[in-house]
Amino acid sequence: MNRTKFFLFLFLCVIFSWLIGNVMFTIQEKSKFFLSILSVFFMFFGIVVYEISSRASQSKNLYLFSQIFLISVLLKITLFVFIVILAIRKLGYDKKEIIIPALFIYLIFTIYETYFLMKISHQKLS
């Protein structure tokens, strides 16, 4: 997957997640801000994973790419849960407003991350 295509689809994921946070659910502005920040977090996380996995696909170590994939999935879900719990307990966000939209946003970026990692892994085999 080339960089232009990756960033185009990533931008579409950000737009789609913004629509989820601002149009599909009726929530307060404070919660909309949190969901926007969460989308930005996933965007940067995706960029980092893309850069690392692109380099790993060129490695002679056959297991490096798989290890990066597993570590990125584990790290992403752990950070996601930590950020949502922090937002609810320490920052006072209403859990009824942010949990479902946040899960949708997580799902959008996870599906895309899996897609581009599969594309990169197939390039490795070619």
Image (cartoon, rainbow, N blue to C red):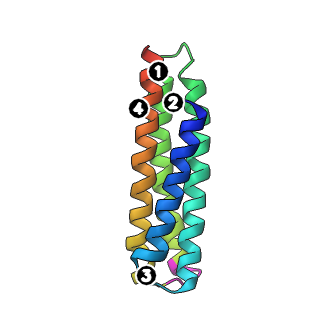
Residue under circle 1? 123
Earlier-in-chain disc, 4 versus 1 = 4
Tell whether label 2 touches label 1 (CB within 8 Å): yes
For image coordinates 54% across by 12% down, the residue present is 60
Earlier-in-chain disc, 2 versus 3 = 2
User: Secondary structure of the magenta portion, mostly?
Assistant: loop
Q: Which label is found at residue 118?
A: 4
Where residue 106 appears, x then y in whole percent?
A: 44, 59
Q: Secondary structure at mark 2?
A: loop
Which marked residue is nearer to the observer: mark 2 or mark 3?
Answer: 2
| Residue 89 magenta | yes
Where residue 35 appears, x then y in whole percent?
A: 53, 70
Q: Which label is found at residue 68?
A: none
Q: Secondary structure at mark 3?
A: helix
Residue under circle 2? 1
| Residue 84 magenta | no
Q: Magenta stretch? A: 88-93
Question: Please, is residue 28 above or below residue 107 in the view?
Answer: below
Mark 4 and mark 1: span between their CA atoms?
Answer: 9 Å
Q: Which of 36/45 is in front?
A: 36
Mark 4 and mark 3: span between their CA atoms?
Answer: 33 Å
Tell whether label 3 touches label 4 (CB within 8 Å): no
Which marked residue is nearer to the observer: mark 4 or mark 2?
Answer: 2
Q: Which label is found at residue 97?
A: 3
For image coordinates 61% across by 34% down, the residue present is 51
Residue type for callout 4: Met
Residue type for callout 2: Met
Residue type for callout 1: Gln
Residue type for callout 3: Glu
Judge the density around disc 3: few (<14), some (14-19), many (≥20) Cα neighbours within 10 Å.
some
